[in-house]
Amino acid sequence: MNRKILFLDFDGVLHPDGYPHFSRLDLFTACLLQMPEIDIVISSTWRYEKSLAELRALFPAELRARIIGMTPILDIGLDLRGRQREIESFLQTNTSNAVFNPVSNTAWAALDDMREFFDDGCPNLIWVDPEFGFSEDDGMRLKKWYDQA
């Protein structure tokens, strides 16, 4: 069985762009509770300003233990394809330690509203429309990935 890791952006995903609170968090949580084998890694720029403990505290208790880390902050993070490089760096660094299975047994997806942070046609990206944030359709695409990973 593959280990499943979801790399999670916040702005444009857990809330539409311009909204001050996580208006889509309840829907996201309900979705993730149907997929108990997904671990979460924060890839949002919120990690620039907040610790992992502070970010975990933003989530309901039933998801907090599943948030296993944050991607590293690389100089190219906000550049074209930069977020994918940060994800790849996280995977390369962390899959060799005892907590993780080898890279070949790790399936990953990214929920993000910024296509340009990923390689063109990146099969691991589940793009979220930033005008709406995480939707039921996004949840269905995530579930499809989960079932196939």
Image (cartoon, helix red, strand yellow):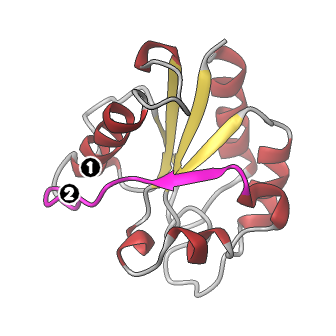
Dominant SS of magenta comes to loop
Is 136 placed left or right of 112 in the picture?
Answer: right
Q: Residues within 10 Å of mark 2 (few under 14, many from 20)?
A: few
Q: Give the mark nearest the N terminus, 1 or 2.
A: 2
* Numbered marks: total: 2
Of residues 38 and 101, which is closer to you in this image?
101
Is 107 placed left or right of 56 in the picture?
Answer: left
Of residues 24 and 91, which is closer to you in this image?
91
Disc on res. 2: none
- Where is residue 139, by image quadrant? top right
Q: Which residue is mark 2?
A: 74
Residue drawn where x is 71% and y is 75% of the image: 23
Q: Position of residue 146 (x, y in %)?
A: 68, 26
Q: Amino acid at mark 2?
A: Leu
Q: Which residue is mark 1?
A: 116
Magenta-highlighted residues? 65-78
**Magenta-colored stretch includes residue 77:** yes
* Residue 128 in view (yes/no): no
Residue drawn where x is 56% and y is 61% of the image: 13
Position of the C terminus, as image quadrant, is top right
Residue drawn where x is 36% and y is 42% of the image: 90
Q: Residues within 10 Å of mark 1 (few under 14, many from 20)?
A: some
Q: CA distance from mark 1 to mark 2?
A: 16 Å
Residue drawn where x is 56% and y is 33% of the image: 99
Q: Is residue 59 above or below residue 94?
A: below
Q: Is residue 100 above or below residue 9?
A: above
